[in-house]
Amino acid sequence: MINLGIQSSVDEALYQMGLDIEELEDLEEDAGLGNGGLGRLAACFLDSMATLGLAAYGYGLRYEYGIFAQKIVNGEQIEEPDDWLRFGNPWEKARPEYMLPIHFFGKVVDTPTGKKWIDTQVVFAMPYDSPVPGYQNNIVNTMRLWSAKSPVEFNLKFFNDGDYIQAVLDRNLAENITRVLYPNDNLFEGKELRLKQEYFMCSATLQDIVRRFKATKKGELRTDFNYFPDKVALQLNDTHPALAIPELMRILMDIEGLSWEAAWDITVKTCAYTNHTVLPEALERWSVSLMSSILPRHMQIIYEINFQHLQEVQKRWPNDNARLKRMSLIEEDGDKRVNMAHLSIVGSHAINGVARIHSDILKNDLFRDFYELSPEKFQNKTNGITPRRWLLLCNPNLSDIIGERIGDNWITHLDELTNLNQLVNDQSFILDVQKVKQENKMKLAHWLESEYNVKINVNSMFDIQVKRIHEYKRQLLNCLHIITQYNRIKKNPDGEFVPRTVMVGGKAAPGYYMAKKIIKLINYVANVVNNDPVIGDRLKVLYLENYRVTFAEKIIPAADLSQQISTAGTEASGTGNMKFMLNGALTIGTLDGANVEMAEEMGDENIFIFGMNVDEVELLKRKGYNAYTYYESIPELKQCVDQIQNGFFSPNNHDEFKDIVDVLLKWDRFFLLADYQDYIKAQDKVNETYLDQNKWTRMCIRNIASSGKFSSDRTITEYAREIWGVEPSWEKLPAPHERIADLPKQS
């Protein structure tokens, strides 16, 4: 409604019908079709591509069950299926006329006209289209999601055996491909069904794209594929769609009859790859035996790509066998595996990370060999968020006071927010910003009271960390600060403390033992803190159940402090950090991901930076990290760890959190104790600053004013110009009922 410019009209119309628009919005299910930030980033990109007038499609899978709904029971995460399509989805339109066959298994034979993949199992891909309107420019793009449908002809053998029931049941096996989303964030799980999902999406999407490329407006067939890269750009969002590379090769060679050389040239010019993680456990490495069974033709193509690639490496670095081994697409140690990141790099003309520091790590470390081979391929594209959803929609009062001062051009040109710098000492604007924040806090507190039955001190600092639960994101470090704060109040009950409400939210992958333990610990700590009469309302801890996009839209506008505390060198970018910044929360964070560029934009004095930087982390790794040195030498830290260890927070089971303590002291990959002291110091500085509300608000205004760089419009403009070779346009098209001649000329 916002993007179509009809929000107030619809609001008014519904009001006259006796309906409340907010109640209706709450009835709509979130389409939880992705994991954490990666899926949310894609959604922001779709909004920007439509707003910038780019003819772009978002392709994905229409999972029947999206990311699970999280319940917290006795402090533990319980997963419930997210049946988001239970009552249908009014925004989508099924397009059976574009249904496509997808092949699995079978074998490859040589024929006089080339290779042929035969005896395959077929599943159909049915497209469902959802409209993606640009911001008030009369442009609507499409998100096309694929759903698996069984082929109509049953297995006749079963009919002849009289097993009609089994024949019908077997249809379900085909349709299982899009039944459920794997809920792993930053973890690769090499399951057969997941490989089928990835190939199903790539094959359906590429067949669809090739069909559109061949069909011209005049009705004749376009047959010259040399123009394909001029008309089509494929951006691989991480390695999950990496099979697009061998699949495009297969279509061009086996179906369209091109030579290997021609097909390879077209494929590389068409594809580009965005890397979203440096964590080794997240990088996809598919077993060769599994791929050979499910996708025999693709495995042949990958072997040939690898052969030609290694010849090139051999030419550049003769007799460097170690380098050949490192750069191979096939990892030979133990079970042979295909390294999907290597495939994506070799098969693409552009490779990018998603924040400057992340892109540097790709070049200097993770993909260093490939960077040395083809430095011209590597780029950086710092992530962004759409200001339409993350300010205009979720924080209308803040949008209003900004619009009153600087106009509304910021909605599509977010860098115009720099004009707010002139108001940083304007007392009336400072008061307006404070008033908006307070109203947002009261609104959130009211909502949380009705949902969680907790009383929240709206005059406390709202200290918030919401994101997927992962050891590298260090929710545990946040927890150590909560315990430290608790101990300080207990030690000095009459002391002056800045009251805080600490909120942590996020889902843990169902199989991720440590992440689920961390959730339990935070809930157990909350139970002790919230029920201690000495603490009162000076410290409250809340675990936010079932964190999701619509919940984020309530939380982020109300935040005072945003926690972005991952170990330096582990978070590719982060986009939650940008949402909080845009909504006038201050950040406590490490020099990781986009935090680095945020600090540059706003100035170090407007952000609370702590902890080791990437080089210092590397140095500590090389030197050898011994957690006990920190544990023994910092009394407050030792007290926290001992309390977790000896059952202070789990009186009914003293060993409940033994595994957490073991990780902290013996095999912590993310150096929590090394950063603890600096983190506590930074938190003390946060408290001190918060006492001076005018200073705090001026810092908030500086944060908002410097968020222009972090618009996804800027990110997409860079992708368009530097990777896809298209020019964005801010021109408004005529509405369907307008004649072009009647429109005023755009400059």
Image (cartoon, rainbow, N blue to C red):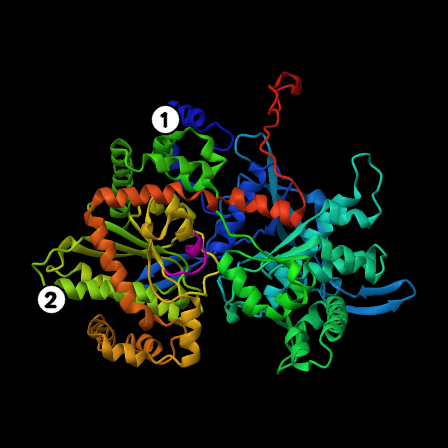
Disc assigned to residue 18: 1
Which image quadrant for residue 114?
bottom right
> Percent x, y for residue 366?
56, 69
Query: Number of marks in the image?
Result: 2
Q: Judge whether residue 345 is colored magenta.
A: no
Q: Residue at x 34, y 31 (%)?
A: 401
Q: What is the span of residues highlighted in magenta in the rendered image? A: 590-597
- Neighbour tally class for label 1: few under 14, some 14-19, many 20 plus, Cα within 10 Å: few
Q: 71 or 422, which lies in front?
A: 422
For the residue pair 565 and 447, the one nearer the viewer reads as: 565
Residue 735 occupies quadrant: top right
Crowding at mark 2 (Cα within 10 Å: few <14, some 14-19, many 20+)? few
Q: Position of residue 36 (x, y in %)?
A: 46, 56
Q: Report whether 371 appears left or right of 252.
A: left
Percent x, y of residue 661: 30, 76
Name the element at disc 2. helix
The residue tagged 2 is 491
